[in-house]
Amino acid sequence: GVTVCFGILGNQMFEGVKQGRAIDGLRWSTFDDVGSSTMWWFRVAVGTSLIDITADLAVQPPYCTVPSPESGMQGDCGMGTVSSVVVIAYAFLCRFLLIPLITGTLVNTFFDTIDDMRSLVSDAELAKYDECWRQLDPAETCFIASWKLKPLLERLRTLRSDLWIDPER
């Protein structure tokens, strides 16, 4: 979402900027349309060098063509310092906030899935056990008397729980 928003912003701010080292005229390396602008911002997010990028977007006269309203000629100058601020802000946002957040979420989800696959007891069985335990420990002290163990196991058997153990064995 952030990259697409910056893609639209980049297309509006930097369309037609003079080609240089980072803006090289390839379809995915310009700001001439929203799609290529979005792809360009994606490259910034994943680690393209910011030096060439900011230099290309900040190009000023005499190294670019100044727009001329009289002749109708559109210029190809950048936006100076503003472009550097925009690029560095986006790079900071992506590299230090969004990408680590997404990576952390993926790693956490991966390990949660692995834990669920390795678990010997399913969540449904734990819910049955919890229900039986709460009936015998309504004050939620996390303790039950030893004489309540047999009723606990009988209730688990009644619920057809896999955690049921025959108390007579």
Image (cartoon, helix red, strand yellow):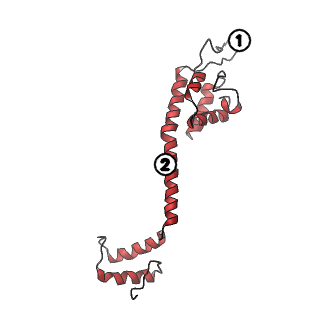
Q: Is residue 119 above or below residue 162?
A: above
Q: Nearer the viewer, mark 1 or mark 2?
A: 2
Of residues 160 and 43, the one nearer the viewer is 43
Residue 20: x, y in percent?
65, 22
Disc on res. 9: none
Residue drawn at the location 35% of the way across and 74% of the way down: 134
Classify residue 55 by image quadrant.
Answer: top right
Quarter of the image where the N terminus is located: top right
Mark 2 Cα-neighbour bin, 10 Å: few <14, some 14–19, many ≥20:
few
Question: In the rendered view, does 148 fall on the left or right side of 82?
Answer: left
Task: Say which element carries label 1.
Answer: loop
Task: Say which element carries label 2.
Answer: helix
Residue 52: x, y in percent?
59, 25
Residue drawn at the location 52% of the way across and 38% of the way down: 94
Question: In the rendered view, does 86 fall on the left or right side of 134?
Answer: right
* Amino acid under disc 2: Gly
Give the spatial CA distance, label 1 vs label 2: 54 Å
Of residues 115 and 125, the one nearer the viewer is 115
Classify residue 133 by image quadrant.
Answer: bottom left
Q: Is residue 84 above or below residue 45?
A: above
* Amino acid under disc 1: Ser
Disc on res. 104: 2
Residue pointed to by mark 1: 71
